[in-house]
């Protein structure tokens, strides 16, 4: 951010193209308020296939809300969301649902069924494209799906744990299972909301490193909300910092400055409720 409070765009330029080559996700002018309080105030964001973007910003600045709007868990008040060049509207029409199935969200809470096997949990990523009966019992998962899920588990380094109950794995391993589930969904855009906030530093580094690898090697578009700028600098291609529901910093990860971080996390800019969290 500049001393005058303007957005510090090192690269790319301010106005995101909605459908340029390689742009997997483009958000323009996204607006969202809760009970009259503006949370997203015209957010612009662009994410390319093969890119790992770290989303930074103080508590309450709107990071989760932005991701939730993209995957359809929140309905924006205004703005546009384009997924692979096509508009995903707020309406629950078939085209928007199809586009949103290209996106997967990974949460801090992994949302695994702890008593079911690791493999069954990964297979569950495919439920959106399978007939409803498959959700009744994992015995109905087709063999090809199990093979695909094994390949996803192999990709996150956990094939050997496929038969164990998911609840038996460590926190970092469970988060890797959740990422494998997103792969089994065949998502091309993975949005991770604080995926490592509950993990120790070593596990956190592994999980963020894995997300970066998946972006690079499988050409996924990956955005992760992180509260650790050091992880963003080490693994991300680009960093976007939000302030008051808008983009305040958009820079290659290596160009993120201490002044940027000071501006993003300045205590005197936060609403009073944040001070006491
Ligand atoms: N469903 C909701 N109803 C009412 N207020 C909400 C809702 N979801 C989010 N908010 C409010 O919107 C603001 C932004 O929340 P959001 O979770 O997007 O922030 P964040 O940047 O992800 O914060 P954190 O880093 O703490 O997770 C907060 O003040 C939050 O209380």
Image (tube, rainbow, N blue to C red):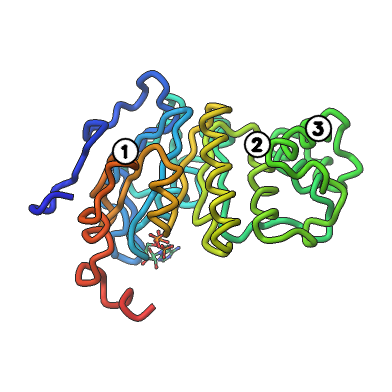
Give the Cα distance between marks 3 and 1.
Answer: 38 Å
Q: Is residue 21 left or right of residue 103?
A: left
- Residue, far bottom: 276
Of 242 and 82, the residue lying toward us: 242
Which mark's residue is nearer the viewer, 2 or 1?
A: 1
Q: Which mark is residue 269?
A: none
Specify which label sits upstream in the sequence, 2 or 1.
2
Ligand 1 is within 8 Å of the C-beta of the residue at disc 3: no
Closer to the eye: label 3 or 1: 1
Q: In this image, 133 relative to 99: left or right? A: right
The residue indicated by pointer 2 is 183
Taking the image as shown, residue 109 lies to the left or right of residue 115, namely left
- Residue annotated with mark 3: 145
Image-based side of 214 in relation to 88, left or right: right
Q: Which residue is mark 1?
A: 252
Quick one: which residue is furthest to the right in this view? 139
Q: Residue 141: percent from the left, percent from the top?
A: 85, 38
Q: Nearer the viewer, residue 47 or 131?
A: 47
Indicate whether 208 appears above or below 151.
below
Q: Is mark 1 within 8 Å of ligand 1?
A: no
Q: Earlier in the sequence, mark 3 or mark 1?
A: 3
Residue 188 position (above or below residue 19): below
Q: Secondary structure at mark 3?
A: helix
**Residue 80: image x %, image y %?**
35, 37
Pick whichever of labels 3 and 2 is earlier in the sequence.
3
């Amino acid at each position: 951010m500049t001393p005058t409070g303007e957005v510090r765009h090192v690269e790319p330029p301010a106005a995101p193209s909605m459908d340029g080559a390689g742009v997997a996700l483009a958000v323009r002018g996204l607006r969202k308020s809760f009970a009259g309080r503006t949370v997203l105030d015209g957010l612009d964001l662009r994410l390319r296939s093969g890119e790992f973007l770290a989303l930074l910003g103080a508590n309450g600045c709107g990071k989760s809300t932005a991701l939730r709007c993209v995957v359809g868990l929140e309905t924006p008040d205004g703005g546009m969301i384009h997924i692979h060049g096509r508009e995903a509207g707020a309406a629950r029409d078939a085209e928007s649902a199809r586009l949103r199935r290209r996106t997967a969200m990974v949460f801090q809470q992994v949302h695994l069924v702890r008593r079911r096997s690791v493999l069954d949990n990964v297979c569950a990523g495919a439920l959106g494209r399978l007939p409803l009966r498959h959700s009744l019992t994992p015995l109905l998962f087709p063999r090809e799906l199990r093979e695909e899920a094994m390949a996803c588990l192999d990709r996150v380094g956990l094939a050997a744990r496929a038969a164990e109950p998911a609840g038996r794995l460590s926190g970092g391993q469970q988060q890797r299972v959740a990422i494998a589930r997103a792969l089994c969904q065949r998502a091309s855009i993975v949005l991770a909301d604080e995926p490592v906030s509950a993990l120790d530093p070593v596990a956190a580094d592994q999980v963020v490193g894995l997300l970066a690898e998946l972006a690079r090697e499988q050409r996924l578009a990956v955005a992760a909300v992180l509260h650790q700028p050091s992880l963003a600098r080490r693994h991300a291609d680009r960093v976007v910092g939000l302030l008051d529901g808008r983009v305040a910093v958009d820079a290659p990860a290596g160009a993120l400055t201490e002044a940027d971080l000071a501006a993003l996390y300045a205590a005197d800019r936060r609403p009073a409720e944040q001070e006491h969290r």
